[in-house]
Amino acid sequence: MSDLASTVKQAQSGDIAAFTALVRRFQDMAMGYAHAILHDYHQAQDAAQEAFIEAHAGLSTLEHPLAFPNWLRRIVFKHCNRMTRGKDSVKIVSTEVALELVAGGKSSAEIVEEDEMSKLLHEALD
C-alpha cells in the first residue's frame, strides 16, 4: 500500500494527524488551482479552506484512497465555481493554464507573487 493510500485510510478512520498530513501535502495544490481560477489570493484561500472542510466531512465516501488528489481538485473547483457565480469581475482561466500551474509545482506564494507582478506591470503600462 502506498504512503498516500495509507494516510488516506488512516484519515478515513478518524486519525486527525493523518488528515493534517493530507492538508499539508495538498494545500499548495489546492491554493494554486483555486488561485488559477479565481485570480484572487484571499478568495483562493477561502475556496481551498472550504474544500478541505468538505473533504474532511466526506472522506468516508472516497472509495479509492489514491484518487484523493483528483477528488480534492474537484471539490476545490466546485467551491471556486460557487464563488464565481454572478460575479462578472472574476476571470476564469482555461483548464490548460490551471493544470499547468498545478502540475508545475508552483507554490501558492509564487503564484501570488507572479500575479502581483503582472498587476503592477499592467498598471504601469496603462
Image (cartoon, grey):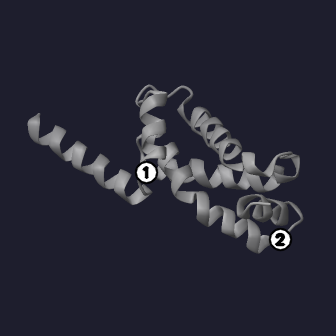
The amino acid type of the residue labelled 1 equals Tyr
Report crowding for label 1: few under 14, some 14 to 19, many 20 or more residues within 10 A (C-alpha): many
Q: For this rendering, which residue is in front, 58 or 42? A: 58
Measure the alpha-carbon separation of dots 2 and 1. Answer: 30 Å
Residue 94 higher or lower than 40, as above or below: above
Residue 63, horizontal then vertical, whole percent = 86, 45
Q: Secondary structure at mark 2?
A: loop
Indicate left or right for 61 with 24 as reference. right
At 87% from the left edge and 46% from the top edge, which residue is drawn?
61
Q: Residue furthest front?
A: 1
Indicate left or right for 61 with 76 as reference. right
- Viewport quadrant of the C terminus: top left
Marks 2/1 in contact by CB < 8 Å: the verdict is: no
At 68% from the left edge and 54% from the top edge, which residue is drawn?
52
Q: Residue 2 appears in which quarter of the rendering?
A: bottom right
- Which residue is identified by label 2? 15
Q: For this rendering, which residue is in front, 92 or 8? A: 8
At 43% from the left edge and 51% from the top edge, which residue is drawn?
41
The amino acid type of the residue labelled 2 equals Asp
Residue 118, horizontal then vertical, whole percent = 23, 43
Q: For this rendering, which residue is in front, 105 or 36? A: 105
- Which residue is identified by label 1? 41
